[in-house]
Image: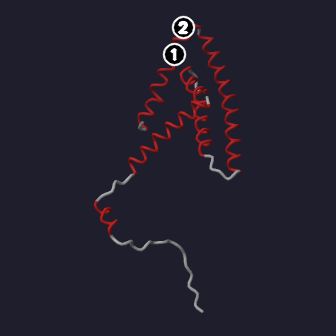
């Protein structure tokens, strides 16, 4: 998804969806009930984000202490942060997105598809297909390799 279309969805379509759902639910259960549910979901969401964020931070610290790179845990932390923003934003649609993002299995599944899609897109844009020059270079003797470094001349 291009950044322009993502911004369009974030600032135009999502609020329209939220307003529609709030009006429909408000017509069924009443306006004050909708306000109460919105406040309750924000409080519950902030609690869930805080606890899952702390657990993720502990896993990151543990991985770093063991000398590992906590890549997946950091990505999960980003998804938890986005879930927190969704849960604090008033509305039922973003609350559902936030709660789904806080479910560990769904969060990892989302990250798996996101990473797989972007790695394949990266490989498509940065892969260099072999051309005639590279084919001819395979038949030629190896050229000198350039190794960068520093040197110091000492006269004795």
The kind of secondary structure element at disc 2 is: helix
Residue density around tag 1, few if under 14, some if 14–19, many if 20 or more, within 10 Å: some
Q: Quadrant of the C terminus?
A: bottom right
Residue at the farthest front position: 139
Compare residues 92 and 129 and report the one nearer the observer. Answer: 129
Q: Is residue 3 left or right of residue 132?
A: right
Q: Image point 67% across, 39% down: which residue?
A: 56
114 w.r.t. 27: above or below: below
Residue corresponding to mark 2:
27
Residue density around tag 2, few if under 14, some if 14–19, many if 20 or more, within 10 Å: few
Q: Image point 49% across, 23% down: which residue?
A: 15
Compare residues 58 and 145 and report the one nearer the observer. Answer: 145
Residue corresponding to mark 1:
21
Q: Quadrant of the N terminus?
A: top left
The mark nearer the N terminus, 1 or 2, is: 1
Q: Image point 33% across, 62% down: which residue?
A: 134
Q: Is residue 55 left or right of residue 22?
A: right
Q: How is the image coloured?
A: secondary structure
């Amino acid at each position: 998804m291009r950044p322009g279309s993502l911004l369009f969805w974030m600032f135009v379509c999502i609020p329209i969806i939220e307003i529609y759902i709030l009006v429909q639910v408000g017509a069924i259960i009443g306006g004050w009930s909708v306000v109460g549910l919105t406040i309750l979901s924000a409080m519950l969401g902030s609690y869930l984000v805080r606890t899952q964020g702390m657990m993720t931070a502990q896993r990151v610290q543990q991985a770093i202490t063991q000398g590992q790179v906590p890549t997946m845990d950091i990505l999960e932390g980003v998804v938890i942060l986005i879930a927190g923003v969704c849960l604090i934003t008033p509305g039922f649609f973003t609350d559902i997105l936030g709660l789904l993002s806080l479910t560990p299995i769904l969060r990892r599944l989302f990250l798996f598809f996101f990473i797989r899609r972007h790695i394949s897109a990266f490989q498509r844009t940065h892969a260099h297909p072999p051309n005639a020059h590279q084919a001819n270079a395979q038949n030629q003797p190896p050229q000198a390799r350039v190794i960068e470094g520093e040197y110091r001349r000492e006269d004795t």
